[in-house]
Amino acid sequence: MSRPRRYLDNAATTWPKPPEVLAAWRRAAEEVGATAGRGLYSEAVEATAIQARARAAAGRLFGGVDPGRVALPSGCTLGLNLAIHGLVRPGDHVIATAADHNATLRPLHALATRGVIDLAIAPCDAAGGVDPAAIAAAWRPATRLVVCSHVSNVTGAVQDVVAITAIAHERGGLVVLDAAQSLGIVPAPRPGWGADVVVAPAHKWLLGTAGVAFLWAREGVEPTTVVQGGTGSASESLEMPEAFAERLEPGTPDVPALAAVAAAAAWLEARGVGAVAAVGIGLADRAAAELGRLSGVTVARAASAAPIVSFTVEGYDPADVAAILEQAGGVQVRSGFHCAAVIHDSLKTRAGGTVRASFGPFNDAADVEALVGAVAALSRG
């Protein structure tokens, strides 16, 4: 008998996907098979309708924003680069945080290295939380942009976006929010959680597939076009279209991924974002508590956090722990630095990073027991 696959890497990409999501992807790939916005035959019209449904879903999930202000880049990293490179101006001062993902830190670092911007990185605490006062303390007269991850992908810390945006807006600045670890877990009670620009992928907690992301910017915030190319509209001109979404969507859209994310949004909305998230959060709370009682195990997890638990085991490299967990019980976790270059200084895990377990809506108590049991065996040495 084969052992169960205990998948605990949902922060990287959620698995399994709801059956409705896979069915929508398969139908778009097998039956529609056309490009959105590029033709008037029936399947092409259906592909365009699928694109519109995905855009509308993003509008709802982002707190009732205008779908016309939602672009659909091929991934969250691309979307964040479009936002950052499209908004900064030479001489700007930009504030990021130590809890951020490399999808924002690397483009900002590249701009700073070239002398285009000045960059300040506000610190985080040992649980990945950023004190909004640290944003205020880093502010300068030339500060124009604050970029931050809504939720830490290492500790699950949920940043106080309301306070951070209030500080930025009082001083005339803008906030770009990386919602990769929050869309699908943290409901948006106000448009874009109050930020000016929000970018999020489909394949993480939203339960869609890779190949599409959402980029929303409020009215009046207009990133300049960084990537040019075909859009299917205004094709007689060498200029990019003026419409927000079209000028940020050059190239061919991934129609099956668009169909999948529209179905994923419907699945989530039917059950409630908070209710679906509560399953994984409850399991992560339990795992963090039980791991924290083990000798030699140090847990890094914020209070009131997303369903993410990082930990280290004394005497073991995180990569070795991850390999042993799968060998011993089929427990699949991630190890290392998790594409977050700076936070490990605050966590004191610079030597090898952490082991990260992240729980989705299809995990259960048996997965927690398998994880804790395998780590307990290691801690006993």
Image (cartoon, helix red, strand yellow):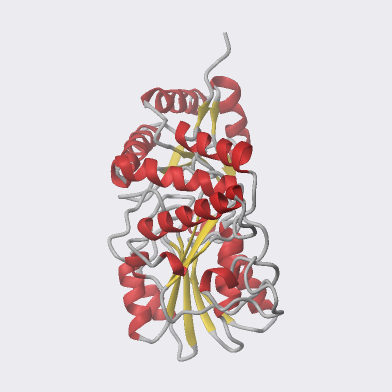
Instruction: Locate residue 329, reporting x and y percent.
Output: 53, 21
Residue for point 63% across, 36% down: 30
Instruction: Locate residue 119, reporting x and y percent.
Output: 56, 78
Foreground: 260 or 118? Answer: 260
The reply, left or right, for residue 319 in relation to residue 308 is right
The reply, left or right, for residue 304 in relation to residue 342 is left
Foreground: 361 or 99? Answer: 361
Total numbered labels? 0
The reply, left or right, for residue 323 in relation to residue 148 is right
**Residue projecting furthest to the front:** 41
Does the image show residue 18? no
Residue for point 53% across, 56% down: 213
Does the image show residue 43? yes
Foreground: 221 or 344? Answer: 221
**Residue projecting furthest to the bottom:** 141
Foreground: 297 or 40? Answer: 40
**Residue projecting furthest to the top:** 1
Quarter holding residue 249: bottom right
Q: Quadrant of the N terminus?
A: top right
The reply, left or right, for residue 215 in relation to residue 186 is right
Instruction: Locate residue 246, reporting x and y percent.
Output: 57, 69
